[in-house]
Image: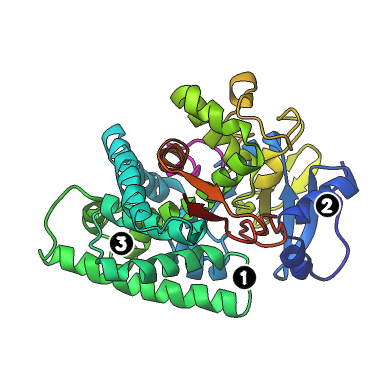
Protein backbone atom coordinates (compact mmCIF):
# COMPACT_ATOMS: atom_id res chain seq x y z
CA UNK A 1 0.00 0.00 0.00
CA UNK A 2 1.04 3.62 -0.41
CA UNK A 3 1.57 5.16 3.02
CA UNK A 4 -0.56 8.33 3.30
CA UNK A 5 1.64 11.30 4.24
CA UNK A 6 0.05 14.33 5.89
CA UNK A 7 1.06 17.55 4.20
CA UNK A 8 2.59 20.40 6.15
CA UNK A 9 5.77 21.20 8.05
CA UNK A 10 4.56 20.12 11.50
CA UNK A 11 1.28 19.10 13.14
CA UNK A 12 2.11 19.37 16.83
CA UNK A 13 -0.39 22.23 17.22
CA UNK A 14 -3.09 20.07 15.61
CA UNK A 15 -2.34 17.27 18.08
CA UNK A 16 -2.59 19.62 21.02
CA UNK A 17 -5.87 21.12 19.80
CA UNK A 18 -7.50 17.89 18.57
CA UNK A 19 -6.34 15.62 21.40
CA UNK A 20 -7.59 12.06 21.44
CA UNK A 21 -9.21 12.43 18.02
CA UNK A 22 -6.09 13.68 16.20
CA UNK A 23 -5.19 10.28 14.78
CA UNK A 24 -8.73 9.03 14.29
CA UNK A 25 -9.62 12.00 12.09
CA UNK A 26 -6.76 11.13 9.78
CA UNK A 27 -7.40 7.38 9.83
CA UNK A 28 -10.95 8.15 8.72
CA UNK A 29 -9.87 10.74 6.15
CA UNK A 30 -7.25 8.50 4.53
CA UNK A 31 -9.35 5.33 4.97
CA UNK A 32 -6.35 3.59 6.48
CA UNK A 33 -4.95 2.35 9.79
CA UNK A 34 -1.51 3.83 9.27
CA UNK A 35 -0.31 7.25 8.10
CA UNK A 36 2.74 9.48 8.37
CA UNK A 37 2.86 12.95 9.92
CA UNK A 38 5.35 15.27 11.60
CA UNK A 39 5.21 16.05 15.32
CA UNK A 40 7.74 18.02 17.37
CA UNK A 41 9.78 18.37 14.19
CA UNK A 42 10.08 14.62 13.64
CA UNK A 43 8.59 12.15 11.20
CA UNK A 44 6.02 9.98 12.98
CA UNK A 45 4.16 6.92 11.72
CA UNK A 46 0.76 6.61 13.42
CA UNK A 47 -1.05 3.26 13.67
CA UNK A 48 -4.21 1.82 15.18
CA UNK A 49 -5.86 -1.58 15.68
CA UNK A 50 -4.98 -5.04 16.92
CA UNK A 51 -2.51 -5.93 14.15
CA UNK A 52 -0.71 -2.62 14.58
CA UNK A 53 -0.44 -3.12 18.35
CA UNK A 54 0.95 -6.61 17.85
CA UNK A 55 3.60 -5.19 15.52
CA UNK A 56 4.33 -2.31 17.91
CA UNK A 57 5.19 -4.75 20.71
CA UNK A 58 7.47 -6.95 18.61
CA UNK A 59 10.85 -6.62 20.41
CA UNK A 60 12.72 -7.62 17.25
CA UNK A 61 11.35 -4.62 15.38
CA UNK A 62 10.86 -1.87 17.94
CA UNK A 63 12.64 -0.42 20.95
CA UNK A 64 11.70 2.09 23.64
CA UNK A 65 15.18 3.50 24.11
CA UNK A 66 15.22 6.92 22.50
CA UNK A 67 11.50 6.91 21.70
CA UNK A 68 10.05 8.80 24.68
CA UNK A 69 10.56 12.58 24.40
CA UNK A 70 12.61 14.17 27.15
CA UNK A 71 9.73 16.53 27.95
CA UNK A 72 7.64 13.49 28.94
CA UNK A 73 10.49 11.93 30.91
CA UNK A 74 10.99 15.20 32.78
CA UNK A 75 7.39 15.16 33.99
CA UNK A 76 5.42 11.92 33.73
CA UNK A 77 7.94 9.06 33.73
CA UNK A 78 11.21 10.40 35.10
CA UNK A 79 14.41 10.31 33.09
CA UNK A 80 15.74 6.88 32.07
CA UNK A 81 13.06 4.96 33.96
CA UNK A 82 11.68 1.54 33.09
CA UNK A 83 9.54 2.90 30.24
CA UNK A 84 12.71 3.80 28.28
CA UNK A 85 14.47 0.44 28.67
CA UNK A 86 14.86 -2.62 26.43
CA UNK A 87 16.42 -6.08 26.51
CA UNK A 88 18.03 -7.55 29.63
CA UNK A 89 17.94 -4.25 31.50
CA UNK A 90 14.18 -3.98 30.97
CA UNK A 91 13.62 -7.63 31.86
CA UNK A 92 15.41 -7.28 35.21
CA UNK A 93 13.70 -3.99 36.05
CA UNK A 94 10.29 -5.36 35.01
CA UNK A 95 10.78 -8.37 37.30
CA UNK A 96 11.30 -5.93 40.18
CA UNK A 97 7.93 -4.28 39.53
CA UNK A 98 6.13 -7.59 39.04
CA UNK A 99 7.53 -8.93 42.33
CA UNK A 100 5.39 -6.34 44.11
CA UNK A 101 2.14 -7.54 42.51
CA UNK A 102 1.52 -10.66 44.60
CA UNK A 103 -2.01 -11.75 45.53
CA UNK A 104 -1.30 -10.89 49.15
CA UNK A 105 -0.14 -7.37 48.32
CA UNK A 106 -3.09 -6.80 45.99
CA UNK A 107 -5.45 -7.94 48.75
CA UNK A 108 -3.73 -5.52 51.12
CA UNK A 109 -4.16 -2.76 48.53
CA UNK A 110 -7.89 -3.53 48.25
CA UNK A 111 -8.35 -3.23 52.01
CA UNK A 112 -6.26 -0.07 52.20
CA UNK A 113 -8.39 1.55 49.53
CA UNK A 114 -11.63 0.74 51.33
CA UNK A 115 -10.20 1.91 54.64
CA UNK A 116 -9.02 5.23 53.27
CA UNK A 117 -12.32 5.97 51.54
CA UNK A 118 -14.16 5.27 54.81
CA UNK A 119 -11.85 7.59 56.71
CA UNK A 120 -12.10 10.30 54.10
CA UNK A 121 -15.87 10.28 53.67
CA UNK A 122 -16.41 10.44 57.43
CA UNK A 123 -15.02 13.98 57.17
CA UNK A 124 -17.48 15.01 54.46
CA UNK A 125 -20.33 17.15 55.72
CA UNK A 126 -23.74 15.97 54.48
CA UNK A 127 -25.01 18.25 51.73
CA UNK A 128 -21.65 19.91 51.13
CA UNK A 129 -20.42 19.71 47.50
CA UNK A 130 -17.31 17.58 47.08
CA UNK A 131 -15.07 17.61 44.01
CA UNK A 132 -14.55 13.88 43.66
CA UNK A 133 -11.41 13.99 41.51
CA UNK A 134 -9.54 16.14 44.03
CA UNK A 135 -10.64 13.89 46.88
CA UNK A 136 -9.70 10.75 44.94
CA UNK A 137 -6.17 12.00 44.25
CA UNK A 138 -5.59 12.65 47.94
CA UNK A 139 -7.12 9.33 49.01
CA UNK A 140 -5.00 7.45 46.50
CA UNK A 141 -1.88 9.36 47.47
CA UNK A 142 -2.34 8.04 51.00
CA UNK A 143 -3.12 4.55 49.70
CA UNK A 144 -0.04 4.58 47.47
CA UNK A 145 2.30 5.67 50.23
CA UNK A 146 0.90 3.24 52.79
CA UNK A 147 1.10 0.39 50.29
CA UNK A 148 4.62 1.33 49.14
CA UNK A 149 5.99 1.88 52.64
CA UNK A 150 6.58 5.59 52.02
CA UNK A 151 6.29 7.68 55.22
CA UNK A 152 3.71 10.44 54.78
CA UNK A 153 2.42 12.83 57.41
CA UNK A 154 -1.24 13.85 57.23
CA UNK A 155 -0.13 17.46 56.80
CA UNK A 156 1.77 16.46 53.62
CA UNK A 157 -1.03 14.61 51.84
CA UNK A 158 -2.55 17.51 49.89
CA UNK A 159 0.83 18.82 48.72
CA UNK A 160 2.19 15.43 47.66
CA UNK A 161 -1.07 14.48 45.94
CA UNK A 162 -1.05 17.77 44.04
CA UNK A 163 2.51 17.23 42.82
CA UNK A 164 1.89 13.63 41.76
CA UNK A 165 -1.24 14.76 39.93
CA UNK A 166 0.73 17.53 38.22
CA UNK A 167 3.16 14.96 36.78
CA UNK A 168 0.23 13.25 35.08
CA UNK A 169 -1.52 16.44 34.01
CA UNK A 170 1.60 17.77 32.28
CA UNK A 171 1.45 15.04 29.62
CA UNK A 172 -0.28 17.19 27.03
CA UNK A 173 0.43 20.50 28.65
CA UNK A 174 2.32 23.48 27.31
CA UNK A 175 3.40 26.70 28.98
CA UNK A 176 2.39 27.01 32.67
CA UNK A 177 0.81 23.55 32.82
CA UNK A 178 3.99 21.88 31.60
CA UNK A 179 6.22 24.00 33.84
CA UNK A 180 4.08 23.07 36.83
CA UNK A 181 4.59 19.39 36.02
CA UNK A 182 8.33 19.93 35.60
CA UNK A 183 8.58 21.69 38.96
CA UNK A 184 6.44 18.99 40.58
CA UNK A 185 8.85 16.36 39.23
CA UNK A 186 11.81 18.17 40.84
CA UNK A 187 10.00 18.45 44.20
CA UNK A 188 8.80 14.85 44.15
CA UNK A 189 12.17 13.39 43.23
CA UNK A 190 13.86 15.40 45.99
CA UNK A 191 11.33 14.04 48.51
CA UNK A 192 11.67 10.41 47.44
CA UNK A 193 15.47 10.60 47.11
CA UNK A 194 15.65 11.69 50.75
CA UNK A 195 13.59 8.64 51.76
CA UNK A 196 15.81 6.28 49.74
CA UNK A 197 18.84 7.70 51.56
CA UNK A 198 17.09 7.40 54.93
CA UNK A 199 16.33 3.75 54.24
CA UNK A 200 19.90 3.01 53.19
CA UNK A 201 21.18 4.71 56.34
CA UNK A 202 18.91 2.55 58.53
CA UNK A 203 16.49 5.30 59.54
CA UNK A 204 13.54 3.45 57.96
CA UNK A 205 13.06 -0.19 59.08
CA UNK A 206 13.01 -3.21 56.76
CA UNK A 207 9.39 -4.03 55.99
CA UNK A 208 9.24 -5.76 52.59
CA UNK A 209 7.82 -2.63 50.99
CA UNK A 210 8.22 -1.12 47.53
CA UNK A 211 10.48 1.49 49.13
CA UNK A 212 12.74 -1.29 50.37
CA UNK A 213 12.61 -3.08 47.01
CA UNK A 214 13.73 0.01 45.10
CA UNK A 215 16.38 0.99 47.66
CA UNK A 216 17.98 -2.49 47.54
CA UNK A 217 17.47 -3.41 43.88
CA UNK A 218 20.47 -4.31 41.76
CA UNK A 219 20.48 -3.91 38.00
CA UNK A 220 21.39 -6.49 35.35
CA UNK A 221 25.08 -5.89 36.13
CA UNK A 222 24.63 -6.38 39.85
CA UNK A 223 24.96 -2.68 40.68
CA UNK A 224 22.80 -0.98 43.27
CA UNK A 225 20.61 1.69 41.69
CA UNK A 226 21.85 5.17 42.45
CA UNK A 227 19.65 7.27 44.71
CA UNK A 228 18.10 9.22 41.85
CA UNK A 229 17.18 6.15 39.77
CA UNK A 230 15.77 4.33 42.78
CA UNK A 231 13.60 7.40 43.42
CA UNK A 232 12.46 7.56 39.79
CA UNK A 233 11.29 3.95 39.92
CA UNK A 234 9.60 4.31 43.30
CA UNK A 235 7.69 7.28 41.88
CA UNK A 236 6.75 4.97 39.00
CA UNK A 237 4.95 2.88 41.63
CA UNK A 238 3.26 5.75 43.48
CA UNK A 239 2.28 8.04 40.58
CA UNK A 240 0.26 5.44 38.62
CA UNK A 241 -1.79 4.68 41.73
CA UNK A 242 -2.71 8.37 42.02
CA UNK A 243 -3.56 8.32 38.29
CA UNK A 244 -6.31 5.77 39.02
CA UNK A 245 -8.29 8.73 40.39
CA UNK A 246 -9.21 9.44 36.76
CA UNK A 247 -10.63 5.95 36.28
CA UNK A 248 -12.58 6.25 39.53
CA UNK A 249 -14.16 9.49 38.33
CA UNK A 250 -14.98 7.90 34.98
CA UNK A 251 -16.47 4.92 36.81
CA UNK A 252 -18.68 7.24 38.85
CA UNK A 253 -19.62 9.08 35.67
CA UNK A 254 -20.66 5.75 34.13
CA UNK A 255 -22.90 5.06 37.14
CA UNK A 256 -24.52 8.45 36.57
CA UNK A 257 -24.82 8.15 32.77
CA UNK A 258 -26.01 4.54 32.89
CA UNK A 259 -27.98 4.34 36.17
CA UNK A 260 -29.09 0.76 35.57
CA UNK A 261 -25.49 -0.28 36.22
CA UNK A 262 -25.73 0.48 39.94
CA UNK A 263 -28.28 -2.27 40.59
CA UNK A 264 -26.28 -4.68 38.45
CA UNK A 265 -23.19 -3.99 40.54
CA UNK A 266 -25.17 -4.52 43.74
CA UNK A 267 -26.65 -7.84 42.69
CA UNK A 268 -24.35 -9.49 40.16
CA UNK A 269 -21.26 -9.96 42.29
CA UNK A 270 -17.52 -9.57 41.82
CA UNK A 271 -17.43 -10.90 38.27
CA UNK A 272 -19.70 -8.13 37.02
CA UNK A 273 -17.74 -5.55 39.02
CA UNK A 274 -14.60 -6.76 37.24
CA UNK A 275 -16.32 -6.42 33.85
CA UNK A 276 -17.59 -2.97 34.76
CA UNK A 277 -14.11 -1.77 35.73
CA UNK A 278 -12.66 -3.13 32.50
CA UNK A 279 -15.38 -1.48 30.41
CA UNK A 280 -14.68 1.85 32.11
CA UNK A 281 -11.04 1.44 31.13
CA UNK A 282 -11.99 0.63 27.53
CA UNK A 283 -14.78 3.14 27.02
CA UNK A 284 -13.43 6.35 28.57
CA UNK A 285 -10.27 8.18 27.42
CA UNK A 286 -7.12 7.67 29.48
CA UNK A 287 -3.67 7.30 27.87
CA UNK A 288 -3.91 8.67 24.30
CA UNK A 289 -0.97 6.94 22.62
CA UNK A 290 2.47 5.40 23.15
CA UNK A 291 5.67 5.60 21.13
CA UNK A 292 8.48 3.29 20.03
CA UNK A 293 11.38 3.42 17.59
CA UNK A 294 12.13 1.01 14.73
CA UNK A 295 15.24 -1.09 15.43
CA UNK A 296 15.79 -2.05 11.80
CA UNK A 297 14.44 -1.61 8.27
CA UNK A 298 11.43 -3.79 7.52
CA UNK A 299 8.18 -3.89 5.59
CA UNK A 300 4.74 -4.53 7.06
CA UNK A 301 1.56 -4.74 5.02
CA UNK A 302 3.28 -2.90 2.19
CA UNK A 303 4.50 -0.06 4.44
CA UNK A 304 8.25 0.50 4.61
CA UNK A 305 9.69 1.22 8.05
CA UNK A 306 13.24 2.47 8.36
CA UNK A 307 15.59 2.11 11.31
CA UNK A 308 15.05 5.06 13.64
CA UNK A 309 11.47 5.77 12.56
CA UNK A 310 9.26 6.78 15.48
CA UNK A 311 5.88 5.05 15.64
CA UNK A 312 2.85 6.08 17.70
CA UNK A 313 0.11 3.60 18.54
CA UNK A 314 -3.37 5.05 19.11
CA UNK A 315 -4.60 3.47 22.36
CA UNK A 316 -8.00 5.18 22.51
CA UNK A 317 -8.62 4.35 18.85
CA UNK A 318 -7.65 0.70 19.34
CA UNK A 319 -9.99 0.39 22.33
CA UNK A 320 -12.78 1.65 20.05
CA UNK A 321 -11.81 -0.21 16.89
CA UNK A 322 -14.97 -1.69 15.29
CA UNK A 323 -12.90 -4.58 13.93
CA UNK A 324 -12.29 -5.69 17.53
CA UNK A 325 -15.34 -4.40 19.38
CA UNK A 326 -19.06 -4.60 18.55
CA UNK A 327 -20.68 -1.16 18.88
CA UNK A 328 -17.47 0.24 20.42
CA UNK A 329 -19.06 3.52 21.52
CA UNK A 330 -21.72 1.69 23.55
CA UNK A 331 -21.02 1.19 27.27
CA UNK A 332 -21.56 -2.51 27.86
CA UNK A 333 -19.70 -4.38 30.65
CA UNK A 334 -21.19 -7.67 29.45
CA UNK A 335 -19.02 -7.46 26.33
CA UNK A 336 -16.11 -8.89 28.34
CA UNK A 337 -18.06 -12.16 28.56
CA UNK A 338 -19.25 -12.03 24.97
CA UNK A 339 -16.21 -10.75 23.06
CA UNK A 340 -12.53 -11.61 22.97
CA UNK A 341 -10.35 -9.10 24.80
CA UNK A 342 -6.65 -9.83 24.47
CA UNK A 343 -3.21 -8.26 24.82
CA UNK A 344 -3.48 -6.41 21.53
CA UNK A 345 -7.05 -5.12 21.17
CA UNK A 346 -7.59 -4.01 24.79
CA UNK A 347 -4.84 -1.52 25.57
CA UNK A 348 -5.99 1.16 28.06
CA UNK A 349 -2.50 1.32 29.61
CA UNK A 350 -0.52 -0.21 26.76
CA UNK A 351 -0.48 -3.65 25.18
CA UNK A 352 1.72 -6.69 24.71
CA UNK A 353 2.87 -9.26 27.24
CA UNK A 354 3.02 -8.06 30.83
CA UNK A 355 5.81 -10.43 31.90
CA UNK A 356 8.43 -9.97 29.21
CA UNK A 357 7.07 -7.03 27.20
CA UNK A 358 6.15 -3.42 27.88
CA UNK A 359 2.52 -3.84 28.97
CA UNK A 360 1.96 -1.86 32.16
CA UNK A 361 2.67 -4.07 35.20
CA UNK A 362 0.24 -1.97 37.23
CA UNK A 363 -2.98 -3.03 35.50
CA UNK A 364 -3.95 -5.38 38.32
CA UNK A 365 -3.31 -2.55 40.77
CA UNK A 366 -5.56 -0.28 38.70
CA UNK A 367 -8.43 -2.76 38.61
CA UNK A 368 -8.03 -3.63 42.30
CA UNK A 369 -8.31 0.04 43.32
CA UNK A 370 -11.20 0.67 40.93
CA UNK A 371 -13.16 -2.31 42.22
CA UNK A 372 -12.64 -1.38 45.87
CA UNK A 373 -13.56 2.27 45.26
CA UNK A 374 -16.61 1.67 43.09
CA UNK A 375 -17.88 -1.05 45.41
CA UNK A 376 -17.60 1.41 48.30
CA UNK A 377 -19.58 4.12 46.52
CA UNK A 378 -22.24 1.68 45.34
CA UNK A 379 -22.70 -0.32 48.54
CA UNK A 380 -21.58 1.83 51.47
CA UNK A 381 -21.97 5.54 50.73
CA UNK A 382 -25.24 7.38 50.33
CA UNK A 383 -24.45 10.17 47.87
CA UNK A 384 -25.92 12.09 44.97
CA UNK A 385 -24.41 13.73 41.91
CA UNK A 386 -24.83 17.49 41.97
CA UNK A 387 -27.05 18.85 39.24
CA UNK A 388 -26.07 21.70 36.93
CA UNK A 389 -22.39 20.77 36.65
CA UNK A 390 -20.55 20.24 33.35
CA UNK A 391 -19.90 16.51 33.06
CA UNK A 392 -18.91 16.67 29.40
CA UNK A 393 -15.46 15.32 28.53
CA UNK A 394 -13.05 17.59 26.70
CA UNK A 395 -11.52 15.23 24.14
CA UNK A 396 -8.98 17.86 23.09
CA UNK A 397 -7.31 17.82 26.52
CA UNK A 398 -4.56 15.27 27.23
CA UNK A 399 -5.16 13.72 29.72
CA UNK A 400 -8.83 14.51 30.17
CA UNK A 401 -11.62 14.40 32.76
CA UNK A 402 -15.23 15.51 33.05
CA UNK A 403 -14.98 19.29 32.97
CA UNK A 404 -16.43 19.71 36.48
CA UNK A 405 -14.18 16.92 37.85
CA UNK A 406 -17.37 15.23 39.16
CA UNK A 407 -19.10 17.03 42.00
CA UNK A 408 -21.08 14.93 44.45
CA UNK A 409 -22.47 15.37 47.94
CA UNK A 410 -22.94 13.01 50.83
CA UNK A 411 -26.54 12.59 51.95
Dot 1 surroundings within 10 Å: few (below 14), some, or many (20 or more)? some
Question: Which residue matches tag 3?
Answer: 230
Residue at (38% x, 56% y) in the render: 139
Snapshot colouring:
rainbow
- Residue 3: which numbered mark, if any? none
Residue 352 within the segment the image draws in magenta: yes
Q: Position of residue 123 (x, y in %)?
A: 35, 58
**Quarter of the image containing the N terminus?**
top right
**Front tag of 3 and 1:** 1
Apparent side of residue 62 relative to residue 370 in the rendered image (left or right): right
Apparent side of residue 401 relative to residue 329 in the rendered image (left or right): left
Question: What is the magenta range?
Answer: 350-363
Q: Is residue 186 above or below residue 394?
A: below
Apparent side of residue 136 relative to residue 301 in the rendered image (left or right): left
Identify which residue, 374 or 223, lies in the foreground. Answer: 374
Indicate which disc, 2 or 3, sits on the residue closer to the N terminus: 2
Callout 3 touching callout 1 (CB < 8 Å): no
Q: Position of residue 281 (x, y in %)?
A: 57, 41
What's the CA distance linking mark 2 and mark 3? 41 Å
Indicate which disc, 2 or 1, sits on the residue closer to the N terminus: 2
What's the CA distance linking mark 2 and mark 1? 21 Å
Indicate which disc, 3 or 1, sits on the residue closer to the N terminus: 1
Question: Which residue matches tag 1?
Answer: 173
- Tell me which secondary structure the magenta stretch mostly adopts: loop
Report helix, strand or loop for mark 3: helix
Question: Which residue matches tag 2?
Answer: 25
What's the CA distance linking mark 3 and mark 1? 26 Å
Identify which residue, 306 or 197, lies in the foreground. Answer: 197
Q: Position of residue 228 (x, y in %)?
A: 32, 68
Callout 2 touching callout 3 (CB < 8 Å): no
Amino acid sequence: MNLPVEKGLDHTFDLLTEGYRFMQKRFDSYQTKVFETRLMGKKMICMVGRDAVKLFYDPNRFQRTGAIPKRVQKTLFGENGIQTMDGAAHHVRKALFLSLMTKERLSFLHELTLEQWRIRTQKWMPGKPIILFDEAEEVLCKVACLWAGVPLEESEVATRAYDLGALIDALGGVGPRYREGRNARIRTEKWIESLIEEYRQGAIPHNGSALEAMATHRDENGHLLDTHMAAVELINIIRPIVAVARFIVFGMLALYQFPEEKNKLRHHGDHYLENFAQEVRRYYPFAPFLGAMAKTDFQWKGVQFKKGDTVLIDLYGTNHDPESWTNPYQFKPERFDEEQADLYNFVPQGGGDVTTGHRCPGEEITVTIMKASLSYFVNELDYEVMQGQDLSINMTRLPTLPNSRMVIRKQ
